[in-house]
Image (spheres, helix red, strand yellow):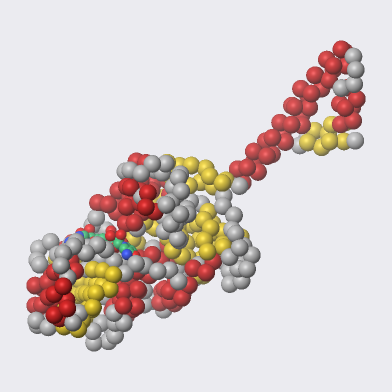
Amino acid sequence: MLAVSGHHVVPFGHYVTCFLGGAKKRRTSRFLVRELTRSWAEPTLQMFGQLARFAAMKAMVIKEWGGPERFELAELPKPTPAAGEVLVRVRAASVNPVDYKIRQNGGWSKVPMPAILGYDAAGTVEAVGANVTHLAPGDDVFYSARIFDRRGTYAEYHVEDASIVAKKPSCLDFEAAAALPLAAITAHDSIIGFFQTKPGDTVLVQAGAGGVGCYAVQLAKAAGARVLTTGRRENTDFIRSLGADEVIDYRATRFEDEVLRLTQGRGVDAAFDTVGGDTVVRSIGCVRPYGKLATIVNVAGDVSSMAFRNQTLYCGFMERTAQKIQTLALLASRGQLRPVVDSVFPLERIADAHRRIESGGMKGKIVISVA
Ligand SMILES: NC(=O)c1ccc[n+]([C@@H]2O[C@H](COP(=O)([O-])OP(=O)(O)OC[C@H]3O[C@@H](n4cnc5c(N)ncnc54)[C@H](OP(=O)(O)O)[C@@H]3O)[C@@H](O)[C@H]2O)c1
């Protein structure tokens, strides 16, 4: 009988015989066991080690909530797709404010420790679970992940419910595609979903250079609206390049006064708040009666005066659907929605990417490349 191990061919039956009776034979057997370990077991263990590495993946994780310095590189088991899921080899992710909010103190997010953050991904399907019919291994895809009680996309591999994963338009590379999902779906929910923006409308978008704002400006413009937006003065040309008709320097003027001036006192048809605090309350007087307001952040103050103006306030929480991600793909392939990439950081420098988004002044999205 021959046992084949790496380059070694071992007469296996010989060892078995040597365990039978006598001190000399026992010494011989110990020698042969050592030999066996060296010649057969070690290469076998090495082989298993290599297999184990094949099933592992690189990820940037945090083990405790806190600052960006909490991120560390880790090797974790590569996930496997369950029925209805896809396993994606992530090529690019992006950073959203919710990522640093979770990183700072994210117990509410139920992300399991060690936590992998990251809500956006673009990559290639590596495997599909049972009942997945619209995607196959080799497809390039993009999506916004659900990470509540699950793991995110700051990793080489990620599994996601196939129903919210769409094929990536071929006109976008992975980094551009990863800059879209969460922020652009959020913008779509308000500009198209709540406001149903149409030609002739005037829409105010807060923070036209922000991750959500840069897509809201484009979508409102594509829908035919006149777009007023806020931003810091040094970003004016950039925000105009997205399609904004007017950029209000929010640090130099009161946006509500500027909006009334730019609309000859009439007010806008709809105002989209991506900033929070007292922004909604301050917007009430510069939205026309029967107009609409939407916010995706906290609202501070008293909104009861909206009733006297017959206005509607939508409080939005971004909702992922296959249809929405496919709409983004369509708009991007028609050139009606351009991914806006402020900067690209390699996965290992995710801490610097978080420092960048937390310090403000960006033009669009921060993207993470995953080699
Ligand atoms: N509810 C949801 O489903 C949902 C979904 C997505 C995002 N969000 C939330 O929405 C917010 C915005 O997200 P994001 O991705 O757009 O963030 P972001 O990329 O960090 O952009 C924030 C923008 O706000 C601008 N800004 C700050 N203070 C301002 C002010 N007083 N007036 C006008 N603009 C101001 C910043 O401009 P400068 O830095 O240039 O000054 C920056 O462009 C975050 O709080 C995020 O968590 C909620």
Residue plotted at (36% across, 56% down): 95
Name the spot of residue 159 as percent of width and height, x first: 53, 58
Name the spot of residue 17 as percent of width and height, x first: 91, 25
Using the image as rendered, state which of residue 335 and residue 193 is in the foreground: 193
Position of residue 171 in the picture relative to residue 2 (left or right): left
> Is residue 273 shown above or below 147?
below
Position of residue 157 in the picture relative to residue 6 (left or right): left
Number of marks in the image? 0
Quadrant of the rendering where the N terminus is positioned:
top right
Position of residue 107 in the picture relative to residue 138 (left or right): left
Residue plotted at (64% across, 38% down): 49
> Is residue 89 shown above or below 302?
above
Tell me which corner region of the image, top left, top right, bottom left or bottom right, holds residue 300: bottom left
Q: Quadrant of ligand 1?
A: bottom left
Is residue 23 something one can see in this rendering?
A: yes
Is residue 125 something one can see in this rendering?
A: no
Outermost residue toward the bottom in this view: 200
Residue plotted at (74% across, 26% down): 38
Name the spot of residue 363 as percent of width and height, x first: 28, 61
Residue plotted at (44% across, 57% down): 147
Using the image as rendered, state which of residue 371 and residue 323 is in the foreground: 323
Position of residue 100 in the picture relative to residue 125 (left or right): left
Tell me which corner region of the image, top left, top right, bottom left or bottom right, holds residue 342: bottom left
